[in-house]
Each structure stands twice: as structure tokens, then as C-alpha cells.
Image (cartoon, rainbow, N blue to C red):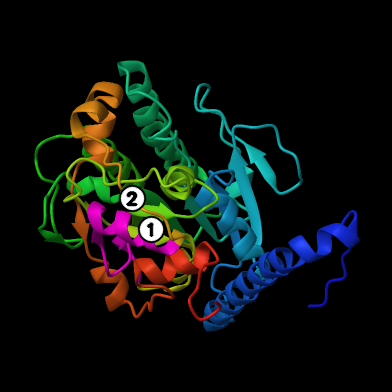
Amino acid sequence: DEIEYALPFHLISSPLLSKSIRHRLSRTFHFRHRRTSLDLSHQSQFSEKIAPRVLITGASGLIGANLKAYLETAGYIVFTLSRRSPASPRAFQWDLNTDVFPIEALEMVDAVIHLSGENIAGGYWTNKRKKQILESRVRGTQLLVEAIRKSSSRPKVLISASAIGFYGDRQGAILTEVDPPDGKNSFVSEVTRAWEHEALKAEDAGVRTVLARFGIVLSPQGGALQKMLLPFQLGLGGPIGGGSQWMSWIGIDDALYALHTLLETPQAHGAYNLVAPEPVTNGEFTKILASVLSRPALFPVPEVGLKLLMGQLAEELLLSSCRVSPARLTELGYSFAMPSLEEYLRFALGRELSYK
């Protein structure tokens, strides 16, 4: 790439700013080139597509929006299903309140990737909010599976989102897909179990069904990492609670590549943990992020304060411990693009040591 640019008042500003601007531009294009290379490398593994037409629900969310762009660059025809009015010929609308579902959308596709659901970390968990979170997933999945059953031309595969919250708070035990929930009936575990139960009913209609149990999906564009960045960049970051709780994470790139693998692998069915093979404790996460940003991390967030401010949400999403292994994904032959947290953060935040 060649870029020509001129700064305002260049005689004064160029000596002061040109080095910084060149560094930022170079860093941006280095990132774009590497991501493009990673995308093309993974896409080349599935040049013969078994599901070239895909319907995505929840395509406006962090994972859905990135997945749509990724699949389209790989040559897929992508349709979307949302509660918004259709903005293009490939967009469809559904309504959970009135049970309206456009069955014709299913008759146009080979696969459905179901990512729709209320943001579980989007606000204090009042009883009303918890009901919205549960019903958006359970009722939405029920409506989708009912439509699949009624469709005259069913999709070959359904990939339904879930979460590693299925396992509950398990401290340091290493968990794989064969492990059951902890039996404590936490809210997140209750939601994921009900969500998965409805999705698996698609198997009765002869549809290959995959449950994608996402860990903490990291991206500077949104989610947990985006919320952490500003305080850490200001040098105000620190561990949450005691910092001993395990965080099972996955970079957004590997999340997309794993979904692509599950989509195009006929023998893939049932639950898969979408997490990197190297989970870290919150304390380790804090140290690595601070190191990547070249900032101190001296301000721990006290557990008591979190519980007072955020209640059950803090207990289940921030303070609980879940050390999860991507066992079945690895058995399927999937190779992670970025298995270590430091490697991913340096890539995603433009702080790669090799580039410096």
C-alpha cells in the first residue's frame, strides 16, 4: 500500500507529528494484512462448500456482524434474520412477541447460525431483565426450530449459540464438553441449559445440530475487552476481586474460524467449547493486558463493591471461575490461529513485538 497525505500547517506540524502518524498508519495496515492473510488461509480449507447459503440470526451483534462479513468474503451468500424492518433483499424480519417467522427464509438456505439473544451483560439483573434474557433465547430458539420442522426445504445444519456458563462456577477444575452443569442452578447455567434443550429438538427434524458454547469473546470492537480498554489505557486497571477466578477466552478471529469449521464439517454435532486452549486467571489476564498496553495495573476492583453495584450479574459473570478446554474442537482437527492471550492481544491492539 502507498498512501500520500499532507498535514494541516505542514511546515509546523510535519516535524512534530509525521513520525507518529506514519507509525499509526503502518500499524493499521500491518494489522489488516495479517488478518486478511489469516482469513484467506482458513477459508482455503473449505473451498468446496457444503452449505454455501447461510442464514444468521443476531447478525447485528459483535459475533454476528463479523461472521457475516467473514462468510461473504469467503464466497457465501448470507441472509439475516432480525427484529428490525428488512433493509435489503437478503434480510428477513421475525417477531417473538407475535410468533411471526418468515419460513421462506429457511427455504433459501443450507444452514442457520443462530446467535440471537438479549445482551446478558447489558444491565442490572432485575427479575424483568432476567425474564427478557431467558425468553429471548428460549422462545427465539423454539420459534426457529418450529419453523424448521414446518419448512418444506430444511437446512442441512443448525449451529446454535450457547455459553460456557452452562458448567457453572467450577473453580479450577478443567472442564470438557462431557462435564455436566455444577447443579447449583445459577441463572446463566439455567438459561444455557434451556437454550440448548430447545436447539437440540432440531435433530428430530433430521437437521445436524451443533451447540457453540462460547467463552469470553475478545475484540476491541465490543464486549468485555472494549469495556476494559479505557481504564487500562489510563493506567487505572486492576484485577477483579481476588483475581484467582479462571477466564476461558477466545479471540474474535478464532471464534469465526471455529464456527466456519463447525459449519463445513459434516461429522460435527452436539456441544463444542469455543475457547482458546490456554485459559488464564483474572490476575494473569490483568498483568498481560497491562503489559501489552505498557501501563501499570494497580487498582484492584473489590469483590464487595462489585456485588453491591451489580448484584447477581457480578457473581456469575465477573467473579465465577470456569476453566474450560476446547477438547472436541481440537479432536475435530481445528488449529487455533492465536492460542495464547498475549499473542492475541498484541495482534488485536496493534502491539506486536515483531512489528515494533
Q: Compare residues 41 and 192 and report the one nearer the observer.
A: 41
Identify which residue is drawn at 45% across, 36% down.
143
Q: Compare residues 5 and 202 and report the one nearer the observer.
A: 5
Residue 152 lies, in percent from the top left, at 55, 50
Quadrant assignment for the N terminus: bottom right
Identify which residue is drawn at 75% across, 61% down.
17
Left or right: 304, with 291 as reference point: left
Residue 162 lies, in percent from the top left, at 34, 48
Numbered tag placed on residue 280 in the rendering? none
Quadrant assignment for the C terminus: bottom right
Q: Secondary structure at mark 1?
A: helix
What amino acid is found at the position of numbered circle 2 in the picture? Ala
Query: Which residue, given by chain and number where applicable, does mark 2 sit on?
Result: 297
Which badge, 2 or 1, is on the more N-terminal residue? Answer: 1
Q: Which span is picked out in magenta? A: 268-292
Residue 323 lies, in percent from the top left, at 19, 58
Q: Are marks 2 and 1 in contact (CB under 8 Å)?
A: yes
Q: Secondary structure at mark 2?
A: loop
Identify which residue is drawn at 39% across, 35% down.
121
Residue 346 lies, in percent from the top left, at 47, 68
Gap in angstroms between the C-alphas marked 2 and 1: 9 Å
Query: Which residue, given by chain and number where applicable, does mark 1 sit on?
Result: 289
| One can see residue 312 in this view | no
What amino acid is found at the position of numbered circle 1 in the picture? Leu
